[in-house]
Amino acid sequence: MSASDDRRVKPEGLNRPRRNRRFGAALLLAPLLLAGCFGPTPQPRYLVGQPYRLGGVWSYPAENFALAETGIAQALRDTSSRLTANGERWDAGRPMAAHRTLQLPAVIRVTNLENGREMLLRVNDRGPERMGRILGLSPRAAELLGVPAGGTAQIRIAVDSELSRRLANRVAGRQVEAVPVEAAPRAAVSSESLAPPPGARTTGQDVAVRAEGPAAEAAVALPDVSIPDAVARGATQPGQLVIEAGTFSLRGAAEQQRARLAALGAEIESRGRGTAQTFRVRIGPLQSLGQADRTLERALASGVSEAAIRVE
């Protein structure tokens, strides 16, 4: 073999190191590519938060383990893979909800008053953006509760105090006092089990939250809180829509509020007696959700920031 021939012959395996380097680089890039596909890494935490403005309306978050209210739910169309207000992963395929003021996360019992369906939902985000809506439902939650995509429904919500306190206690260094809570009477509700729609999970939803800030570094793994996906059905209880414009302990304060809304036909409703007497300012009943939305907009424009649509 000539010297020139010797220069043209490459030892076996000379190119392998280059291929190995390329394979190694691909392995290093894989996690980054996956992160780009699935969005930021979830960092769940307990959150109350500061007052904020959304959809032209100010909201004032507060810890409340006894909240019970009626109003209008909105089926959200959000199918993005993003982080919620408290750092959890938003998953349109799981039953989730958004509330403007509750501590996050929280567990609430939601009843669709129009068809009687009710279930527990995990609240882990702020919203909905539309004024006059008290709860935003993930597509899966809306499906289970029988709310059409993008549609609305009259609902009643009540915080499940026990489960919500257990969720709060998942945060390292933060303990919420456990309070014995009796099961609320459920008159005229026969817990009829419904067959879950196709794809419903039978293992429940698992939630884990952690502390925010320096406490996060000391967080330890704690047992998850399981929220069943069970849907029950009771009696339908659709009601009339009204605008609630505040409840006062002094009639004089209620009269001042009524005067602000006199053009909208506001009235004062007295409840209770003696030192327990309260005075509620309300408008209605209203004939449709559209009319309720328009009346609410006018009430808010009159400076009554606490005005809300309720179901009676």
Image (spheres, rainbow, N blue to C red):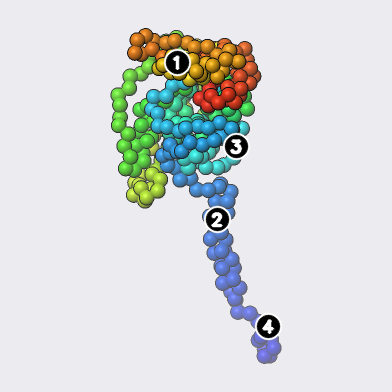
Q: Nearer the viewer, residue 193 or 295?
A: 295
Q: Is residue 270 visible?
A: yes
Tell which residue pokes out farthest to the bottom in this image: 3
The secondary structure type at the circle numbered 2 is: helix
Read off the residue under disc 3: 79
**Residue type (three-letter) at the residue carrying disc 1:** Gly
Read off the residue under disc 1: 252
| CA gap, disc 4 and disc 3 | 59 Å
Pair 4/2: label in front: 2
Q: Which badge, 1 or 3, is on the more N-terminal residue?
A: 3
Pair 1/4: label in front: 1
**Residue type (three-letter) at the residue carrying disc 4:** Arg
Residue at horizontal 59 percent and vertical 68 percent from the top: 19
| CA gap, disc 1 and disc 2 | 62 Å
Left or right of 294 in this view: 42: left
Percent x, y for residue 131? 58, 27
Read off the residue under disc 4: 8
Q: Which badge, 4 or 2, is on the more N-terminal residue?
A: 4
User: Badge 1: how crowded within 10 Å, few (<14), some, or many (20+)?
Assistant: few
Instruction: Answer above or below: position of 10 versus 243.
Output: below
The secondary structure type at the circle numbered 4 is: helix
Q: Which badge, 4 or 3, is on the more N-terminal residue?
A: 4
User: Badge 3: how crowded within 10 Å, few (<14), some, or many (20+)?
Assistant: few
Percent x, y for residue 312? 51, 13
Residue at horizontal 53 percent and vertical 55 percent from the top: 31
Q: Quadrant of the N terminus?
A: bottom right
Percent x, y for residue 261? 56, 18
Q: Nearer the viewer, residue 100 or 200?
A: 100
The secondary structure type at the circle numbered 1 is: helix
